Image (cartoon, grey):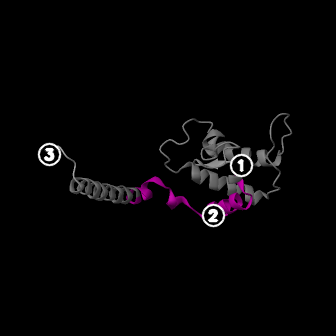
């Protein structure tokens, strides 16, 4: 090997590395697209879940809460709130009571506003959060309380 580093050698390393990492990027993109159906629970999506997502968006919940790591970190992560607050047996009654009790008025704690959601809207929001909790997130969030 020569003692000098030529322009040709640098060009070959640049183009060779670029091609290698571009092919690696394509392979990882393909792998990700192939695993999406296994990781999501798209088959369980129904009209109630869609309406719940609409409630989530119309009330700008993401402005304070995060969902699966996306959103603001002002309020708790809600990607696993279904599991944290009782699952199938207790979550819907918990969410109804929680939404009716807002704002809590605890001194030193910022309050969640009262959105005055209907019973149907809270049920739909509960279905959306239940559906979200069943997405395979590679154990995100890292702790149970989000």
What label sits on residue 108 in the rendered view?
Answer: none
Q: Main secondary structure of the magenta part?
A: helix
Position in image of residue 121 (x %, y %)? 74, 59
Residue 98: horizontal and vertical position, in percent? 77, 45
Q: Residues within 10 Å of mark 1 (few under 14, many from 20)?
A: some
Disc nearer the start of the sequence (3/1): 3
Q: Report the Cα–Cα distance between label 1 and label 2.
A: 21 Å
Between marks 3 and 2, how big is the CA–CA gap? 65 Å
Near mark 2 (Cα within 10 A), the count class, few <14, some 14-19 or many ≥20, is: some
Q: In this rendering, is residue 139 above or below 60?
A: above
Q: Which residues are magenta?
A: 33-61
Left or right placement of residue 74 versus residue 102 in this view: left
Residue for point 64% across, 55% down: 127
Q: Secondary structure at mark 2?
A: helix
The mark that comes first in sequence, 1 or 2, is 2
Is residue 19 part of the magenta span, yes or no? no
Q: Residue furthest front?
A: 4
Residue position for label 2: 50
Q: Nearer the viewer, mark 1 or mark 2?
A: 1
- Front-most of residues 105 and 71: 71
Looking at the rendering, which quadrant does residue 44 occupy?
bottom right
Dot 3: what SS? loop
- Answer whether residue 54 is magenta in the image: yes
Residue at image mark 1: 64
Tell which of 94 and 14 is nearer to you. 14
Mark toward the start of the polypeptide (3 vs 2): 3
């Amino acid at each position: 090997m020569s003692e000098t580093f030529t322009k040709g050698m640098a060009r070959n390393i640049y183009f060779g590395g670029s091609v290698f990492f571009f092919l690696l990027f394509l392979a990882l993109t393909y792998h990700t697209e192939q695993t999406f159906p296994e990781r999501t629970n798209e088959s369980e999506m129904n009209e109630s879940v869609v309406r719940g997502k609409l409630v989530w968006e119309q009330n700008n919940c993401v402005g304070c809460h995060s969902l699966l790591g996306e959103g603001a970190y002002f309020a708790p992560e809600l990607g696993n709130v279904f599991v944290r607050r009782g699952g199938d047996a207790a979550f819907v009654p918990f969410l109804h009571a929680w939404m009716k009790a807002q704002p809590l008025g605890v001194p030193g704690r910022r309050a969640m506003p009262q959105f005055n959601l209907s019973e149907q809207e809270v049920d739909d929001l509960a279905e959306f959060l239940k559906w979200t909790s069943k997405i395979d997130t590679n154990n995100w969030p890292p702790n149970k309380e989000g």
